Image (cartoon, rainbow, N blue to C red):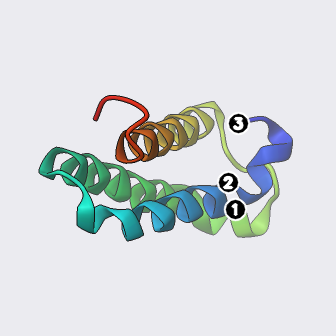
């Protein structure tokens, strides 16, 4: 995530998570397990960086940005699989 994107990085991840939560009742067990793992990682990332994010705009270190980027990609992949656009 670029620095200008890091301002609301938690909001972006939470929005993706919330959108997928709505679709999960129709999902396969594999997709549900994938979502549960991503959901837990968002909570862990927020616990690690959330309090700091309120005090500073560009709070994510390189590792945090990598994790957030990976989570976003995971949500996008899961969203595509639920839409039938890709593998689960």
Residue that numbered label 1 is attached to: 53
| Alpha carbon distance from label 3 to label 1 | 15 Å
Q: Quadrant of the N terminus?
A: top right
Q: Quadrant of the C terminus?
A: top left
Label total for image: 3
Residue at horizontal 18 percent and vertical 51 percent from the top: 28
Residue that numbered label 3 is attached to: 1
Looking at this view, is 28 or 57 the one in front? Answer: 28
Picture coordinates of residue 34, whole percent (x, y): 26, 46
The circle drawn on residue 24 is none
| Alpha carbon distance from label 2 to label 1 | 9 Å
The circle drawn on residue 9 is 2
Q: Is residue 49 left or right of residue 17?
A: right
**Label 1 CA crowd tier, 10 Å (few <14, some 14–19, many 20+):** some
| Alpha carbon distance from label 3 to label 2 | 8 Å
Question: Which quarter of the figure has residue 57?
Answer: bottom right
| Precedes in sequence: disc 3 or disc 2 | 3
Q: Find the residue positioned furthest to the left.
A: 29
Residue at horizontal 19 percent and vertical 50 percent from the top: 33
Q: Is residue 28 left or right of residue 24?
A: left
Asked whether the residues under the numbered discs 3 and 2 touch, taking CB atoms below 8 Å apart as contact, a structural biologist would say: yes
**Label 2 CA crowd tier, 10 Å (few <14, some 14–19, many 20+):** many
Question: Which quarter of the figure has residue 26?
Answer: bottom left
Picture coordinates of residue 23, whole percent (x, y): 37, 63
The answer to whether residue 64 is above or below residue 42 is above
Secondary structure of the residue carrying tag 3 is loop
Question: Which quarter of the figure has residue 55?
Answer: bottom right
Asked whether the residues under the numbered discs 2 and 1 touch, taking CB atoms below 8 Å apart as contact, a structural biologist would say: yes
**Label 3 CA crowd tier, 10 Å (few <14, some 14–19, many 20+):** some
| Precedes in sequence: disc 2 or disc 1 | 2
Secondary structure of the residue carrying tag 2 is helix
């Amino acid at each position: 995530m670029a620095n200008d994107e890091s301002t609301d990085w938690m909001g972006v991840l939470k929005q993706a998570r919330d959108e997928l939560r709505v679709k999960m009742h129709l999902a396969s067990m594999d997709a549900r397990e994938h979502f549960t793992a991503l959901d837990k990682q968002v909570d862990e990332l927020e616990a690690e960086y959330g309090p700091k994010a309120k005090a500073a705009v560009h709070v994510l270190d390189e590792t945090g940005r990598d994790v957030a980027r990976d989570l976003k990609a995971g949500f996008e992949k899961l969203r595509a699989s639920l839409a039938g656009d890709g593998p689960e």
